[in-house]
Amino acid sequence: MVTFGYHVLPEWFSPERIIEGLVMAEEAGFTIGWISDHFHPWFDRGVNCSFAWTLLSATAERTRRIKLGTAVTAPILRYNPAIVAQAFATMGYLYPGRVILGLGTGEALNEVPAGVGWPSFRERLERLEEAVQVIRLLWKGGFVSFRGKYYRLRGAKLYTLSKSEIPIYIASSGQSTAYVAGKLGAGLITLAGLGFDWIKEIVITSYKKGLADAGHSAAKGDLVCEVICSYDEDEKKALKNCRPFSATLLPLIFRANVSDPREIEEYGNMVSEEIILERWIVSSRPEDHIERYSRLAELGFNHIEIVDISPDHRSFIKFYKEKILPYFGQQPG
């Protein structure tokens, strides 16, 4: 069975609109609300960039069932992993069974402006692995001392623990992170924009190898695929709304030390409309959405995380409530 999550972008929408969208998503039948955890946005003009953890708690107070998580937090530089552990343990105490922690190796736009630098990918991956260890040690309770290559704990103890287990999902777009997700995570988050062949041959294969090497069952983890979607009856309007976010289709943006939203916005101009239409869903026809998700389900994904960049979030959610979610067996809450 495939479930669907609704992903909101703090850089595009004001805090109150984000909360409204997630409340509506719960009512429509989405099972998880995802929030990007960014310091800087992907572009400069006409944007917000509010704090994801604040929005998670505010939304949890206004909803009853929908699970909530970051997609994703980088617990490696601007965040000390001990603070990540404390923040999410507190949310897990207040909203048991509803909190998910998505983790990744980060992007320069979130780390460099905070003055913490941008180390090599190898170092960031090592930091991520060590951070997961720190977080889980603290979540066990009791006093913890830890001495790793990058992080230290000296008699640290979380006095407020989650009332239920918090799953850790790890984001991946390539071989190394997918392997770590299989080895350490409760699930993997990857991007439909990478292309079906890359996902199947590189990401899923590496994830399964990580599961096997860690002695986990192949059925242990969740497979989550993030899909960018812009819906409007006027499809030209829907396509126009994709342009500010289009730089994220360039692998360079995730790897390089590029942190100025103005510069990132310029890179987005390099992306053609044809690439956007190929990699994302820009359509008002239900069959186009259903076909894409059915293909992802065939690859083994059991959760689709839809990033809504539509001109009108209310129309998007109504469309999914009436046309898409029922096809896959999800009913309004």
Image (tube, rainbow, N blue to C red):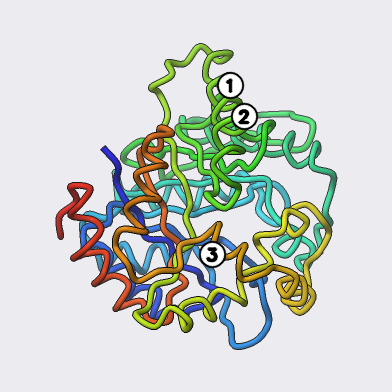
Reading the image, the residue beneath label 3 is: 277
* Few, some or many residues within 10 Å of mark 2 (<14, 14–19, 20+): many
Which kind of residue does numbered mark 1 sit on?
A: Gly
Quadrant assignment, res 124: top right
Q: x%, y% of residue 251?
A: 73, 53
Lower sequence index among marks 1 and 2:
2
Q: Distance between the residues labelled 3 and 1?
A: 33 Å
Q: Do the residues labelled 1 and 2 touch (CB within 8 Å)?
A: yes
Q: Nearer the viewer, residue 86 or 19?
A: 19
Q: Can residue 14 be seen in this view?
A: no
Q: Is residue 124 left or right of residue 201?
A: right
Query: Can you say which quadrant of the picture contains the N terminus?
Result: top left
Question: Measuring 24% from the left and 72% from the top, which residue is drawn there?
Answer: 318
Reading the image, the residue beneath label 1 is: 210
Reading the image, the residue beneath label 2 is: 180
Lower sequence index among marks 3 and 2:
2
Q: x%, y% of residue 288?
A: 36, 59
